[in-house]
Amino acid sequence: MKLFDAHCHLQDPRIFSLAPRLISSSLDSGIAHFAVNGVSEKDWHLVKQMSESYPSVVPCFGVHPWFVPERTAGWFTILRQFFDSTPSAAVGEIGLDKGSRGKQIDFDVQVEVFKKQLELAKELRRPASVHCVRAFGDLLDVMKATGPFPDGVILHSYLGSAEMVPELARLGAYFSFSGFLMSMKSQKARKMLKAVPSDRILLETDAPDALPNSKLGDLFLVEGDPSLTPELQALGENPYLRAHSDLSEVEKEVPELSKEMLNHPANIHNVLAYVASLLEMTEEELAGISYSNAIRLFTYEGSKISQEDNAAAGTVPEQSVEG
Ligand SMILES: [Zn+2]
């Protein structure tokens, strides 16, 4: 079984020094590729460096909405330079956020920065990885105005409604699921998952965030971290997500996970098991579908995805995107 982590942050300062070990243990557990998303000008060079060291790392560059205020006057020129010098790169993480952290940031400026990067993705014919919290109406408006996106827009850690899925899919959206899905009521999550066309499903970890709400024994915890306290072990599950079992709570605030609770990309197996159970599919079936979707999406001019990857994934053409 092969898996593709369609969205993570292995350059994150909390795990950067551990990345070589995280990558090698994840490769051992069947994860063949990682889309590593930069979030601001400050970390693009780390993402680039990581992609040069590891064939399995697909670099992505973008300004995440939380980091919009700290962009420099020349941010867009610098972003373009990163794409010029890194032909294998995709766009991300970009997006819109009206959650507790996002609403402290001027929304008009968020839209402007997001739009510019979506347009760049279109121009470069690359997929773009998008973060959206409490702003799905605005997202749809921007995507309609800028789209369609035949090269794909990844709605990462998708927690939107089932009702919005068809319109977003027509514009070129892919729907990527992480441990955050476990914070949504399972009935609602099942309805939404069943609305997603099978050629648009992706799996991701968003590591080091979004630790799945699984039994501790079933989780990979980041190596070298201090061991969990006996109280946490006694809980037998992730107290952070347990405390946020309601979707609105998660959207309200994503507190910093304590150091020992960081997510490992190998936990994509827990996400796979959960999504497969809701979709009433076998894990093998969902792994095959999501892997071939990711391979198709991340295959573009200059891409690191090889013909062998495509042949192994047996990629099938996706449904048409609105023209
Ligand atoms: Zn992310």
Image (cartoon, helix red, strand yellow):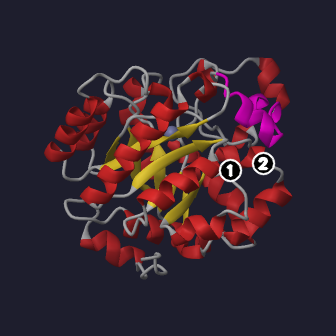
User: Residue 237's x, y, as percent?
Assistant: 78, 35
| Residue drawn at 72 percent across, 71 percent down | 194
Bounds of the magenta span? 238-255
**Picture mark count:** 2
Who is closer to the viewer here, 215 or 319?
319
Residue 166's x, y, as percent? 63, 71
The residue to which callout 2 is attached is 184
Q: Amino acid at mark 2?
A: Met
Residue type pointed to by label 1: Leu
Q: Are marks 1 and 2 in contact (CB under 8 Å)?
A: yes
Q: Is residue 256 magenta?
A: no
- Residue 58: which numbered mark, if any? none
- Determine the image quadrant of residue 17: top left
User: In the rendered image of this protein, does residue 299 appear above or below residue 69?
Assistant: below
Magenta stretch contains residue 243: yes
Q: Residue at x 53, y 41 (%)?
A: 206
Residue 321: image location, x then y, percent: 46, 75
Q: Quadrant of residue 162?
A: bottom right
Q: Position of residue 310 (x, y in %)?
A: 33, 73
Q: Name the residue located 55 percent from the left edge and 21 percent from the top edge.
A: 225
**SS at circle 1:** loop
- Residue 112 located left or right of residue 228: left
Is 200 on the left or on the right of 112, as rendered?
right
- Locate residue 214 relative to residue 140 in the image: left or right: right
Tell me which numbered mark, 1 or 2, is placed earlier along the sequence. 1
Of badges 1 and 2, the one in the foreground is 1
Task: Give the residue number, with chain letter if any, for mark 1.
Answer: 159
